[in-house]
Every structure is written in C-alpha cells, then in structure tokens.
C-alpha cells in the first residue's frame, strides 16, 4: 500500500514539475507575474571606470597599474557581469584581466 501511495505522489510531482516548466517558459509574462520583474539596469552599463578608491585600486596604483571596472549586461544569458581589467599607467596596455563576476539582480514585485 505504501508503495502505491509513493508511486502516485511521484507521478503527481513529475506532472506538477512538467506543468510549471511548460507554463513558465511558454506563457509570456507568467514569470514576471509570479516572481516580479528585474530591477532596472544601472545607467553606466558598459562604461569603463577607473577605480582609485577601493583597496584593489590602491594596490594596483602602487604597482604602476590602473584598475578599471565596468558592469556588462550579457543579453543572451540575461545576467549582469562585473568585469575588471588592469592597464599599465605608462603605456596604457592591458596587462591583466580578472575573471568575470556574476552580479545578482533583484526582482521587484509590481
């Protein structure tokens, strides 16, 4: 008897999961209605800014480098990335690039 109840609960869970996946992927606005919309993108998306105030920026300046960072919107994966690069102050040549850091976007309920 316990096996039959477990089997029926598993079938119900699988059906519910399939329903949620189909509805949320194929019905326009279902995700936004349920979870809210993403907060607005920052105004300076894609613009490189020189960082002289953070600890990393001060350390880079002491080594003769210029630390630049920007927020990049990856449209294909719909995520925000923080990108950092270091330039030589004398030649302005890019000497090092840090790995991209994914920034979490908050959802705002409407």
Image (cartoon, rainbow, N blue to C red):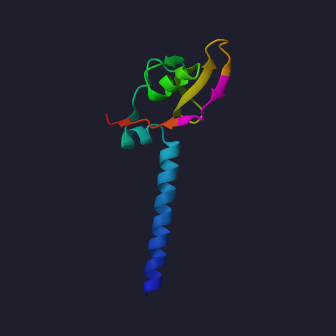
Viewer-closest of 94 and 43: 94
Q: Residue at x 46, y 75 (%)?
A: 8
Instruction: State which quarter of the image contains the C terminus.
Output: top left
Q: How many marks?
A: 0
Q: Residue at x 32, y 36 (%)?
A: 109
Residue 48 forms part of the magenta stretch: no
Q: Residue at x 47, y 18 (%)?
A: 44
Q: Position of residue 12 (x, y in %)?
A: 46, 67
110 vs 6, left or right, is left
Depicted 41 relative to depicted 109: above or below: above
Viewer-closest of 95 and 12: 95
Q: Position of residue 107 (x, y in %)?
A: 38, 37
Q: Position of residue 40 (x, y in %)?
A: 41, 26
- Residue 32, by quadrant, is top left
Q: Residue at x 39, y 36 (%)?
A: 106
8 vs 66, left or right, is left
Residue 97 forms part of the magenta stretch: yes
Depicted 15 relative to depicted 66: above or below: below
Instruction: State which quarter of the image contains the N terminus.
Output: bottom left
Depicted 83 relative to depicted 91: above or below: below
Q: Position of residue 80 (x, y in %)?
A: 51, 32
Which span is picked out in magenta? Answer: 95-101
| Residue most extreme to the front | 62
């Amino acid at each position: 008897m316990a096996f039959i109840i477990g089997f029926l609960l598993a079938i119900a869970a699988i059906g519910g999961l399939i329903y949620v996946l189909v509805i949320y992927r194929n019905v326009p606005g279902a995700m936004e209605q349920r979870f809210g919309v993403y907060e607005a993108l920052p105004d300076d998306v894609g613009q490189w800014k020189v960082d002289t105030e953070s600890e990393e920026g001060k350390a880079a300046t002491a080594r003769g480098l210029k630390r630049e960072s920007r927020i990049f919107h990856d449209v294909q994966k719909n995520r925000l990335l923080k990108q950092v690069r270091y330039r030589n102050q004398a030649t302005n040549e890019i000497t090092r690039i840090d790995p991209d850091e994914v920034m979490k976007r908050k959802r705002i309920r409407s």
